[in-house]
Image: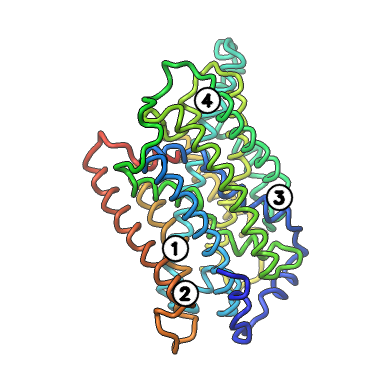
Amino acid sequence: MANGDFRSDIDDVRVDLDELAARKNKGGGMFDSIANMANSILGAGVCLPYALRQAGFFTGIVLLVILCGVTDWTIRLIVRNAKLSGRSSYIEIMDHCFGQSGKAFVSVFQFAFAFGGMCAFGIIIGDTIPHVIRSLFPSLATIPVLSVFTNRQFVIAFCTLCISYPLSLYRDIHKLARASGFALVGMLIIVGSVFFEGQRVDPSLKGDPSKRFSVIGSGIFEAIGVISFAFVCHHNSLLIYGSLKTPTLDRFALVTHVSTALSLVCCLLMSVSGYVVFTDKTQGNILNNFSANDTLINVARFCFGLNMFTTLPLELFVCREVIEQYFFSHETFSPQRHILFTTSILFSSMILSMMTCDLGVMLELTGGISATALAFIFPAACFIQLSDKNLPWTSRTKLPAYICGGFGLIVMVISILLGLAKSFSPSLDGASKICV
């Protein structure tokens, strides 16, 4: 949507969201917000080569570009909805538009998506860091006491409590910007590693070369779900907007454009370079396609694990904000409540990550449904509800929202059907394996 459209209907604003956010905290700069938003998107980038395998090479690339554009538009649409409704959070917007039922729906979806992401990121830490440690120190497992650093459960607990937990205790999301900046550097290393090492991989690990440039695959809807999961950061978009030192629509639009464009370039580079090498053998985590003794890939695995340290607190911010907004929206900030929610949410996700390597069909259903609802259905529905009632649905203003909401509804229904089908077909790979 053009910036000019964002400036329309501003007279309807009942609360100046810009001034409200500016009064709330001093905020951070543009780079801080770009780092946080891009980090939210790129965290699941390693699963995107699998999306090309499912959708087909050319169809997968088209889907990546289109869904990136839709993501850019709907992220800004959420902020526009906040302007039109005079509200400052996703939950308050849904409450304003659809009452208590809307507030309950978005709260459940936001919490489920963010908490599921926390569990997935904890699992990734356990599946990457111990592997790298064992490759660097092969005899470490035989040394008393120190051998615990090769244990998956210990590494998850150690990294979560010593790194992610202190970061999660911050109140202002912009304070994670430096950590997110380091995480972005790590993601660039991962992208570069996949690109360069893919050209030198052992022939026995490569896939069927005849399938490199396929047009369309049989798993196109699974691919849409994977790409949607990767690009969704709508649940913390208003937190990022409010963290700007000077929060304006134009500045946030620039943050969104730069973040999504950077993410798209990295995702395309990783997806294409990974898929053309491994084709039909492409795994959900592209790093798992490489040899365990590949030094550069082990560096990438280590960077990926470190990336999760900073991405996990971003999701915890959302979980905590959902609880605060739903149950304590009219109460002042309480340090005791802040610490209690942070600790309980983080420990719950940590324990689940330690207990399993695959969250199963439940994570697939909650993640897939939540992603489409938060990214496509809710922003479009709120805008339709807030826009001029005299405009026909076919108008230039409303039609994109109807198309976006309809697309999200179709994807949600198909995700539910596929999830139910996979629950009765154990031989099929679940989407939770794709992104975890």
Precedes in sequence: disc 2 or disc 3: 3
For discs 1 and 3, the disc positioned in front in the rendered view: 1
Tell whether 346 sits left or right of 52: right
Q: Which residue is located at x 70 percent, y 40 percent?
A: 182
Considering depth in this image, is 273 or 413 the residue closer to the camera?
Answer: 273
Considering depth in this image, is 111 or 189 the residue closer to the camera?
Answer: 189
For discs 3 and 4, the disc positioned in front in the rendered view: 4
Q: Could you give the CA–CA distance between mark 2 and mark 3, rounded to whole angstroms?
A: 30 Å
Q: Could you give the CA–CA distance between mark 2 and mark 1, rounded to whole angstroms?
A: 11 Å
For discs 2 and 4, the disc positioned in front in the rendered view: 4
Residue behind mark 3: 177
Q: Which mark is residue 198?
A: 4
Figure quadrant of residue 72: bottom right
Precedes in sequence: disc 2 or disc 4: 4
Q: Is residue 345 above or below residue 271?
A: below
Precedes in sequence: disc 4 or disc 1: 4
Figure quadrant of residue 27: bottom right
How many marks can you see? Answer: 4
Q: Amino acid at mark 4?
A: Gly
Precedes in sequence: disc 3 or disc 4: 3
Q: Dot 3: few (<14), some (14–19), or many (≥20) neighbours within 10 Å? A: many
Q: Could you give the CA–CA distance between mark 1 and mark 3, rounded to whole angstroms?
A: 27 Å
User: SS at mark 3?
Assistant: helix
Where does the image place residue 347, in percent across and percent down from the top left?
Answer: 53, 44
Residue behind mark 1: 376
